Amino acid sequence: MKMPGVCEICQVNERKYRCKTCSVHYCSVVCYKKHQEQPCQPPPQPKDTGDDADKQAVEGKGNIPKKTILFSTVDTVPAEKLELLGQSEHLKNLLYNPHLRQLLKEVDSGRDGMNAIKVAMMEPLFVEFADECLRIVEPPEDEAEYRLDELVFTNRQHRR
């Protein structure tokens, strides 16, 4: 029997971490390594209960379940604004482009996030995508504000 808050490997220390694959809680590197001696599996998915809400959300036919933001910062975008991104036909159309999807994967998997963004910002397609995301999440207060792509264009001209 597992006690709440206790490492599921050693059953002694307070749990601090969770395995990304199987969600087992552990307390230290030692316990993590012991856990990794055996291949772990994702937890079994619950049987279909006939409730299609999750399936519809994935297919874009329903509301996406709300996720709790555990560690918000001043830069955290509110969930309501993020939902607006999913409703944008312009963003959906941009994401059909395999080149943009590849750029997003490279940014997401890059070791140096800021450098990956700088490289991606050299691509007009990525700039258009980023500009549209910002326009939705932080609408300009007046039309005189600079657009992101105009700033990038200006920066490119100054480099020459």
Image (cartoon, rainbow, N blue to C red):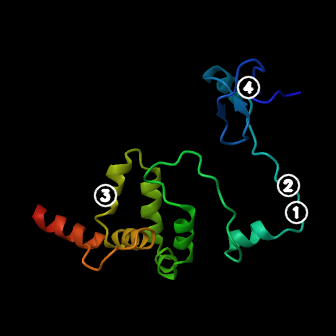
Looking at the image, tell me whether mark 2 or mark 3 is earlier in sequence order.
Answer: 2
Q: Position of residue 70 (x, y in %)?
A: 59, 46
| SS type, badge 3 | helix
Report which residue position mark 1 lands on. Answer: 48
For residue 137, side relative to residue 34 (left or right):
left
Q: Which residue is mark 3?
A: 119
Distance (Cα) linking label 4 and label 3: 42 Å
Label 2 amino acid? Answer: Pro
- The spot of residue 52 in percent (x, y) is 81, 70
User: Is residue 87 positioned above or below 106 on the image?
Assistant: below
* Residue at the (23%, 73%) spot, across then down: 150
Q: Residue furthest top?
A: 12
Q: Can you identify the residue that label 4 sits on? A: 7
Local packing at callout 2 (Cα closer than 10 Å; few below 14, some 14-19, many 20+) is few
Tell me which numbered mark, 2 or 4, is placed earlier along the sequence: 4
Residue at the spot of label 2: 46
Residue 71, relative to residue 144: is it above or below?
A: above
2 or 4: mark nearer the eye: 4
- The answer to whether residue 83 is left or right of residue 149 is right
Q: CA distance from mark 2 to mark 4?
A: 24 Å
Identify which amino acid the numbered label 1 is placed on. Answer: Asp
Locate residue 37: give its quadrant. Answer: top right
Q: Disc 2 vs disc 3: Cβ atoms closer than 8 Å? A: no
Name which residue type carries label 4.
Cys
Residue at 71% x, 32% y is 25
Q: Earlier in the sequence, mark 3 or mark 1?
A: 1
Residue contact at pointers 2 and 1, CB within 8 angstroms: yes
Residue at 11%, 64% (x, y): give it: 158
Determine the secondary structure under disc 4. loop
